[in-house]
Image (spheres, coloured by chain):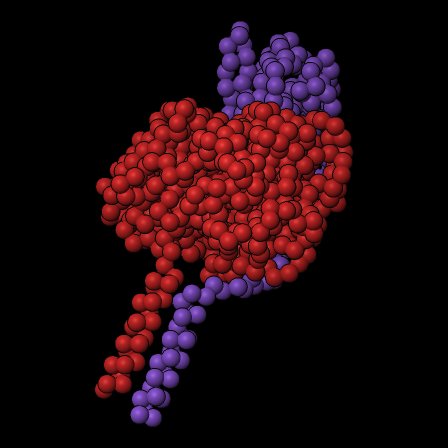
């Protein structure tokens, strides 16, 4: 009888151990050492300004201006932001390349929209006007202009 | 001998009892539970073999039409989902009435005598419109909670048509009868710029944590906030206070649902600032600035315990988090994982306590934590370039042990010539969350027919539909059941840089071939599928923005 009781106790102990093991949720949130990374050098802040004569839906900032003496030209790299809303038309004063850097947009030529996705590049001509409309909430275009006539 | 039999019998009985006691096939919350793993751990019918015969068992079409962008919840043989037409539906899951309405809220006749919510028959709509499928009705997925004023209750966020044309509140409705138990204090007043959109209540500590986002997306941007609602009364907890910006310009809308860490704290993701989108005060930086971030908050008071902001605010071109975080224990610790609209996935150690910050990922005015890992790898954070934007809405993935299934950008976020952006983004990745960057990718399913919607997983089978942002038409979309390569070995492989140019071998380019998981079933359903499929007791419940709720079964 005593032996039976002892074995019953063992059985109860096993059950008591098993139930929490099966149903219990571990609560730990271990704190490993911080990730070791190099501290990136600070970059100069990009200053955006409204584009002259264009709706407030477009802003631009100059990123790089680099003289190209052998070409008697200057490279002018800008970032253009187009926010959601009506199409906006930009005057293009120099020949260059546009690239969608973020978001998506359409250009409108002769009333026909042409979608451009991130990474897409296209040429813009000196003296032309480019109509842009953000497809989402915001699109970023990088403009790379070749400005002639500068030493 | 008899005693051995007694012990064996007792233990076996206990094990069986435990099985019965722990087995819960319900899908009570957005993402199954407050981890948002979207994993059903107790599925016994659906597996890589049986899903090959998956078919529509029933199809509930929202009466009069109404998009379903919220995800279904399943409990006690009932499927619960709210619609953008302002009605919340409880649908019989199985049996002779399967696919039929069990109850709807608001009811077809106003209760008499009036209930505590002042319920009428007016649908739960906001009068101000919405601008995307986060409104004007119910986009907040429901949580099923026991012990709410003595009831098992369905909790969801929705506008109150009888309060200033749609003040946003949480609603608690009896799960079996549809009777309203309480409506919370006002969370998103119509006089303001916010609403409860996609945010679903995260249940912990006798509270429901819910966030607010812009009434109309980014027009104007609102101040993201999280509220804690007392489940017993619907009162707001005044001690809990989180605002994504501190004065100055608005920002940091909470478009997603919060998750709860193993020790009970709150993790959330936030939306963008207004720095480049314009508006009052948007020419100054908010301080503090919790926009575009993954954050861990103290559940008592909303204090920030860490913040990861992968893109510096000066370069915020709207890459915000539309996806919720996935939070919980994996074999290498506890992680919070979320994907941004730029296609990057970031995983952060949850850690005990806080506040934590790491100078390596901080910048002026911002004390930030570093992620444990990012995919694709991002050695220098925060990003300070112009390529992080509004490129592709991402839905959160699903996590099964250390295996994360998520639609992400991958290594080739800049599509090479000849490759469209959609081709880059319409891929499902299987990632190992506890290994090195070099071994991160377990498999890639390229060329999904469209964006991947919410993902769920059970028994090594991954479920997802394709979705088209903003599309609430009855257009056909795909629904996939995909086998993890552990349960159904792959016969094909793809380079881990899938758009590798012709003539270049994957290995020589520094990448490796990884398996392509097998699509076991591909069904065509009506409507875009942004919701998370709910897996419960041999069925998959799929809500579509075309206004259908499907029950799929073998």
Is B456 in front, or is B487? Answer: B456
Q: Quadrant of residue B65?
A: top left
Residue at 40% x, 35% y is B543
**In this figure, what is the number of numbered marks?**
0
Residue B84 higher or lower than B324, as above or below: above
In purple, which chain?
A
Q: Quadrant of residue B169?
A: top right
Residue that sits furthest to the top in the current view: A110
Is B312 in front, or is B195? Answer: B195
The image position of residue A146, as x and y in percent, is: 65, 19
Residue at 69% x, 43% y is B243
**Can you say which quadrant of the picture contains the C terminus of chain A?**
top right
The image position of residue B126, as x and y in percent, is: 57, 28
In the image, taking residue B299 as reference, residue A106 lies left or right, namely left
Residue B520 higher or lower than B389, as above or below: below
Chain B image colour: red
**Can you say which quadrant of the picture contains the N terminus of chain A?**
bottom left
The image position of residue B195, as x and y in percent, is: 60, 34
Residue that sits furthest to the front in the current view: B113
Residue at 51% x, 25% y is A117
Residue at 67% x, 46% y is B242
The image position of residue B292, as x and y in percent, is: 62, 40
């Amino acid at each position: 009888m005593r032996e039976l009781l002892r074995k019953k106790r063992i059985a109860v102990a096993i059950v008591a151990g098993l139930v929490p093991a099966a149903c219990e949720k571990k609560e730990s949130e271990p704190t490993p050492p911080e990730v070791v990374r190099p501290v990136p050098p600070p970059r100069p802040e990009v200053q955006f300004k409204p584009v002259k004569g264009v709706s407030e839906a477009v802003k631009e900032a100059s990123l790089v201006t680099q003289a190209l003496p052998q070409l008697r030209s200057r490279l002018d790299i800008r970032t253009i932001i187009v926010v959601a809303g009506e199409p906006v038309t930009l005057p293009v004063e120099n020949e260059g390349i546009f690239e969608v850097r973020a978001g998506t947009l359409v250009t409108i030529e002769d009333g026909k929209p042409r979608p451009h996705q991130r990474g897409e590049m296209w040429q813009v001509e000196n003296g032309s006007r480019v109509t842009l409309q953000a497809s989402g909430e915001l699109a970023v275009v990088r403009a790379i202009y070749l400005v002639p006539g500068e030493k | 001998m008899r005693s051995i039999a007694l012990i064996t019998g007792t233990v076996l009985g206990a094990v069986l009892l435990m099985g019965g006691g722990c087995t819960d096939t319900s899908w009570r919350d957005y993402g199954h539970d407050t981890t948002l793993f979207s994993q059903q751990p107790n599925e016994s019918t659906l597996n890589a073999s049986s899903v090959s015969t998956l078919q529509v068992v029933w199809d509930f079409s929202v009466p009069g039409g109404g998009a379903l962008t919220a995800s279904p919840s399943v409990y006690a043989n009932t499927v619960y989902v709210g619609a953008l037409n302002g009605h919340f539906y409880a649908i019989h899951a199985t049996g002779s009435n399967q696919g039929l309405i069990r109850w709807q809220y608001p009811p077809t006749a106003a209760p008499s005598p009036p209930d505590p919510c002042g319920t009428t028959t007016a649908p739960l709509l906001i009068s101000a419109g919405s601008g995307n499928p986060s409104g004007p009705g119910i986009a907040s997925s429901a949580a099923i909670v026991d012990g709410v004023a003595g009831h098992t209750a369905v909790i969801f966020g929705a506008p109150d048509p009888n309060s200033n044309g749609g003040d946003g509140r949480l609603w608690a409705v009896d799960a079996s009868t549809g009777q309203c138990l309480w409506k919370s204090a006002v969370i998103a007043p119509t006089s303001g710029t916010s609403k409860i959109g996609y945010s679903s209540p995260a249940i912990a500590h006798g509270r429901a944590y819910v966030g607010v986002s812009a009434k109309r997306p980014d027009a104007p941007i609102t101040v993201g906030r999280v509220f804690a609602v007392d489940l017993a009364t619907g009162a707001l907890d005044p001690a809990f206070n989180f605002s994504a910006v501190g004065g100055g310009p608005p920002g940091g809308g909470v478009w997603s649902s919060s998750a709860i860490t193993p020790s009970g704290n709150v993790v959330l993701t936030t939306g963008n600032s207004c720095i480049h989108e314009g508006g009052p005060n948007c020419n100054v930086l908010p301080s503090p600035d919790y926009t575009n971030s993954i954050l861990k908050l103290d559940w008592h008071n909303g204090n920030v315990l860490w913040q990861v902001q992968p893109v510096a605010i000066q370069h915020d071109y709207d890459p915000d988090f539309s996806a919720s975080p996935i939070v919980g224990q994996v074999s290498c610790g506890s992680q919070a994982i979320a994907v941004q609209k730029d296609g990057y996935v970031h995983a952060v150690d949850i850690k005990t306590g806080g506040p934590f910050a790491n100078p390596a990922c901080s910048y002026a005015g911002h004390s930030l934590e570093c992620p444990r890992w990012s995919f694709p790898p991002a050695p220098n954070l925060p990003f300070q370039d112009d390529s992080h934007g509004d490129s592709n809405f991402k839905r959160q993935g699903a996590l099964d042990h250390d295996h994360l299934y998520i639609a992400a950008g991958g290594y080739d976020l800049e599509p090479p010539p000849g490759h469209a952006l959609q081709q880059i983004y319409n891929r499902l990745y299987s990632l190992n969350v506890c290994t090195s960057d070099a071994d991160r990718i377990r498999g890639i399913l390229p060329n999904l027919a469209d964006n991947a919607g919410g993902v769920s997983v059970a028994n090594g089978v991954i479920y997802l539909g394709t979705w088209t942002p903003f599309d609430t038409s009855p257009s056909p979309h795909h629904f996939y059941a995909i086998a993890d390569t552990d349960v159904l070995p792959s016969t094909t492989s793809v380079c881990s840089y899938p758009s590798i140019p012709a003539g270049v071998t994957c290995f020589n380019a520094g990448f490796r071939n990884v398996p392509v998981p097998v699509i076991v079933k591909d069904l065509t359903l009506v409507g875009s599928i942004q919701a998370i499929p709910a897996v419960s007791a041999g069925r998959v419940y799929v809500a579509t923005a075309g206004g259908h709720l499907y029950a799929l079964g073998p």
